[in-house]
Every structure is written in structure tokens, then in C-alpha cells.
Image: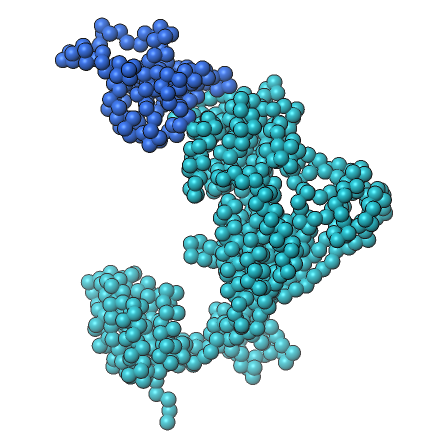
Amino acid sequence: MAFKPRIGVFICHCGENIAGTVDVSNLAEEIIGYDNVSFSTDYEYMCSDPGQNKIKEAIEEENLTGVVVAACSPSMHEDTFRRVVEEADLNRYQCEIANIREQCSWVHGEGNDRPTEKALKIIKGTVEKVKRNVSMEPVEREHSDKCLVIGGGIAGIQAALDVAEAGNEVILVEKSPTIGGHMAQLSETFPTLDCSQCILTPKMVEVNQHPNIELMAYSEVRGISGYVGNYRARIERKPTYVDADACNLCGDCEEVCPVEVTDEFNQGLDTRKAINIPFSQAIPSSYTLDTEACLGLNPLRCSECAEACDADAINFDQTSEYVEEEFGAIIAATGYDLYPKEKMGEYGYGEYDDVIDGLQFERLLSATGPTGGEVRRPSDGKVPENVVFIQCSGSRDPENHNSYCSKICCMYTAKHAKLYRETVPDGNAYVFYIDIRAGGKDYEEFIQNVREEDRVLYLKGKVSKLKKADGKMKVWGLDEISGERVEIDADLVVLAQSIIPSEGAEETSEHLNLNLGANGFFKEAHPKLRPVESLTGGVFYAGTGQGPKDIPDSVSQGSGAAAKAIDLLAKPTLSHDPQVVEIDEDLCSGCGLCVGQCPYDALDINSKGVAEVNELLCEGCGTCASGCPTNALSLRNLTDEQLTEMIHAHIGD
Amino acid sequence: MDLTNSDRELTANVEELSGENIFSCYQCGKCSAGCPFTEEMDILPNQVIKKVQMGDGSVLDSDTPWTCASCLSCEVDCPKGNDVPAIMEAIREISLRKNLDRVDINKLETKGLPEIALVSNLRKKTG
């Protein structure tokens, strides 16, 4: 006996959203006479518990073989209703959604029968599809249990620690010789004024000691292939020319090294040797020989460091080491840079020694900085009496610089002004601002305290320009509140430079096909509801690579990304929607057209000379199926026959 | 104005005479929003405070402290609890000490207002 489908149609009112335009009870009556429809009903909210129960009861009582829910877009509740039919022991792929809201009631006016007629056609088309659907089970696949974390700033550190604590192995890749990121450069942190290194270094040490974390500092990801659960990354560990285990940090090498270059850790306010350690609590705790600065290794030009090293830790023969590993999940925590002050024409193109950026001022305030924590200006080491802080430098300026708010500058500028006033009690601190954005816990109170107790003069308005005269910087500004144009002879100007994504964001996006937003930050899967996920399965974001954020937000997102990665890695197998393409090997000519068309790299020509699909990569878009010249490819549950019958139902013949 | 050489003594004097921390004001503008006399003033009460913060001596040329009737509506409104009328009084006192005569009592419109009321109003904050 031939299989006779018994389809149930469930029509949702969606309050007035559908019922206000479409005659839902009429629909339920009309559809009952249609081919294979053995049950129909309508209900106020099909997605509510009573609505779901109606579906379950009807499946059991009416022995339904397929279900059509005529309601909102499948992107809203398809999964809800498929779970409902599963609970009634029907295969989830025997449930389809007829979208009569977004594609009918919402876009057509009330007061005539035509929306109802159209809704009926949409439902009939869906009935034609579902009665030809095959039952399927999700595609299951093994996956790697390891997690790759790219970037060793505070967000990456937090993510790595959380994933490792959950029992998964982590490789943490950091480009520079030490982890810690920009947070290691900060003096004190708002609004509590904890010393940054004091709260950061214990976490750095924890990373180093954690049995589940392999730290690869001075390393870069060179390529990533694969897909969710099964990524394969190639990582280059660059030579430091120092054996980290043997190095005892005596510093003799640094002392004898004849080369002095700009010190990046001190933001160019100091020099370092070619062989150096960025700061004393650096992790890994070892020296690194910077070959770009060194007089030369091949041929060896100097070797003073090696001669001075009693521990024999220096090895000029080290070369890059390449590691290839499989990863189930990847967390991109590539961090930020400051928008270069060289781009600020109105503030001197970075040419004035005493016009510095926020990170440089952090180094001046830091006890481990070039001035030992005394605020001395770069040009002549003088303690500045008048310090002007300019907020929104490069931010909120769509015409010339970046259109967005960099979010953290209001707070760190207030902190800077406070710390300056505490260090130089006789000094004057002026802050130029457009708005004060202090929307964090205890942040507004912090700002008010800085204004009130530290007597920092806040002036509302953006500084027009800086003019250099007699060793002073003439600041042309405005105070909008008093309506006064103001001029200040500043000894030091601190620019709260805009936050921009580091180079790592673009590099990582190229490796993983990640989307970047217009400003170059990682674009999340959903700006509100999926803020730590990328659209690439198994890739998550943490920290400022996704957008400007402060330390607590970066740490939160690090933990959020870790939770997502742990969730994925904890699954025994990964399942994938089986609505993918199927290949009829007898029809396939092996032309390979589909391989090039596939946007997901899911197709290949196999050793038999015919197309083969990787079901885990296929997203069921159908591009290949429509392009196949021999009709060898078809989408499961969206076959040519199904499409044709749906069209017939729609046009009514 | 030249902020580097601003009149910091003015700021200090206003604070001493009023007993208020002038930097406590964060310029929300509520004092001016609720002031019943702003139409008669050349600058707004919050601008007076801003100018004192900045050490802007031109605040002594303003009519505003003299138009202020010490009705106290600003003091009641202020989210930071600042005694704005006391600040206005401090500015009046500083002007008087500098012999800056801002008000010719003979020219005041006092029709219908008892003189004693006028005097006591102007002296409400002098204690």
C-alpha cells in the first residue's frame, strides 16, 4: 500500500498580527479539503504552551505524518515547532513553517479577501513540500577538544584560563614577547585605582603555570583551515635566541648590548637594548633578542650578549619553529591600538614632544615607567604645571577621523587628571570634553570625585588647535557653558586617542573568513543577542578586537567567549543540519563547476572523479544545485519536485 | 580668556565666603532651569558658577548676582546640594569690597514693595 501522508495545518493568529488582516478561521476551514490535509485548526498564539500542546495532541490523535505551522518567519519559531513535533515522536524535518506574517499579513492591508487568498496559497505550497519531506537525523561528527586563543591581553588571558579550568587544553598565541597586552602598560585602573600590574600579573603567572595551557609567546598564527570543531592552525614560534628555561634574568646581556632602540613597552618614551625583556614581570620570563635591532646574526657582528651570559642561555642558531594543531574552537582576542597621533593635524601631527597620547601618559604615571612614576614631560624632563587633556581625539569625528565613541577615554582621562593632581598638587589640570560618558558601575561617582575633590577644570568643547610658542603649547579651546573662548599655555598636552582594532583583527579575519565592521572591528553574529560569536562556527570574540571596551567588559567578554567555547567542546559530537546537498554520482560528470561556486568550501571532486560534499560545511544554500549542468546535485527536502509542486500550489493549477 | 593666568584668587574667595566647593558643580543647569529671574539676567546662574570655576573675573561685571533675589529655588533644586544663593552673595560681597557699585538703589523699581522687604531680601544670605 502506498504511503498516504496525513498533514495537519496549524494556523496562528499571532494576536492581531495575522488575524487582523487574514481570516484565520476561514483558512482553517478551506485547507481541510486540500490534498492530504487531514486536520486543521487555528489558535491565538501557536507558540504558547497551549498552542504547542494542540500540535502534540493532534499528531497523536490524528496520526499526523507531517505538520505545517502557518505563522511567523521560520527564523523566529521553526526550531520551537520542530522540537514540539519531536516531542510527539515525529521527525523534526516533518514540520515546516508557512510564513503568513512577514510575507503576507504584515505587508498587505486589511479590508479585502486577498491576504486570506494569498495565505491559503502559501499554506498549500508548504503542504506540498512537507508531504514530500524525508525524515532525517542530524549529521554527527567528532571534534577536537582543544581551544586556540589568539591574543594574550587581559581578554585572551581570561578566556584561556576559563577554558583551561573547564578541563580543555588551550594554546594561547601572543605576537609579542610577553603576554599582558596593553593592561600591563597601565599605571592604575579606574574607578578603583588598583595598580594594573598588581591585579594582572597573578593572572599572567596562572597562565604560565596552568597544566592545560600551552603559552606560545612571540608567535603568530600563519594559517587556519577547516571548520567548526575541526580547525587546523599553523603557528610560527619566532626565535628569541634565548633559551627561556636557562635564562636566569641576570640582565648581563642587556647591560653589554651596544644597541639602543625605541622602547615599545614605554610607548617610545624610553630606549631599550636589542636584547631585552619588556618589563620585569613579563611572561614568559625571559629575554628576547630583537633581530631587527641587533647588529647582525648572519654573519655574527657582535655577540657581546652571548659572551656575557653565564647561563649559556643565548643561542644564535635558533630558528622559527612551526606547530600544527587541531582545534575545536577558536577565540579571537586580538586587542586594540591607539589611533596614531601623527594623524592629528590640528594637534601637531605627533611632531611636538610634549603632546603625548593616553598610553604614553600611563607610562609617565607608572612606577615602572621611564620616569619612575614622576610626571616629567618628554622634551626637557620638567614637571608640567599646566596639563591639558583633550578627549575625543580622533573619535566622534566622522569627517576627519573615526565616527565612533572610543568608550574608555572619558574614564581614563579623569583618572589621568586625578593621578596628575595627586602627583603634582600645585599643577593645573584642564580637561576638554564634548560629553562625559561614564556609564559603568561607580564610574559617574569617580568622575564627580575627580571634578570636586581633585579640582580638575572640565571645559566643554573640542580644542581647535595647538600652537607652539616659547616652549609652551598654546591651546585654543572653548568652554561652551560660559560661552568663553579660552587659551591655555600648556606644558604638556595629553590626547585621549581613539581606539582602533590592532592589525591582528584583519589578519585573523583573513585566516577565518570573519566579517569586519566598517570600522575594522570584528563583526559579531548579532549585535545584541550574540555579541561574542562570529558567523563562522566555533569562532568567538573577546575584548577590544570586537569594539572599544574597558577592562571589566573585556574580562566579561573573555569569560563569555570561553563559555561558548566550553559549550562547544563539551559536546561528545557536533551535529549539523542535514538539509544539505546530495550528489547523484551516476549523473555527476565531475566538471567541478560546483566546487568553485560553493561559498563554504564544502564541495570537492573525489578520487572517483565525482563531486563529494562535506556535510558539516554545507549550509544548504543550494547555489551548487541550481548551477549543476547535469542535475546531479539536489538539496535534501528541497528537491526540484518539491519546488515545482510548491510553485503549482502558489499559482493555483 | 587666558586660562593660564586666570584669577584663582577669585575662585578661592568665593569658596571661602560662600563655604561651598565651587568645583562640586558639574554643570547640569538645573539652577538656571528653575530660576524665576533669568529673563532679567545677562548670564545664567550656572554660567556664573562656571566662570568662578574658571577664575574668570568678568563674572564681577555680570548683573546676575545682583538680580538674584535669593529665592532659594536653585538651592532646593541642586542635585549636588550646592548653596547657589550663597555663591551669588559671595560675588556681591567681593564686588562691594572692590567698590564696584552694580546697583543704584535710587533707580530701583520699588513701587508696591516695602523698602524693608527689598533690603532684607538682598541681605538674606549675609546672616
Q: Is residue A531 left or right of residue B77?
A: right
Tell me where residue A352 appears, x and y as whole percent: 62, 28
Q: Quadrant of the C terminus of chain A?
A: bottom left
The correct choice, above or below, for A264 with respect to B51 in the image is below
Q: Quadrant of residue A448?
A: top left
> Does the rendering let one see residue A173?
no
How many callouts does the rendering have? 0
Q: Quadrant of the N terminus of chain A?
A: bottom left
Q: Is residue B108 left or right of residue A335?
A: left
> Does the rendering let one see residue A295?
yes
Name the residue at 62% across, 27% down: A376
The correct choice, above or below, for A286 with respect to B31 in the image is below
Tell me where residue A274 appears, x and y as whole percent: 76, 41
Q: Quadrant of residue A295?
A: top right
Tell me where residue A465 appears, x and y as whole percent: 52, 27
Name the residue at 35% across, 79% down: A88
Name the residue at 37% across, 64% down: A76
Name the residue at 59% across, 68% down: A144
* Residue positioned most to the front: B127
Q: Nearer the viewer, residue A174 or A28?
A: A174
Give chain A's shade.
cyan
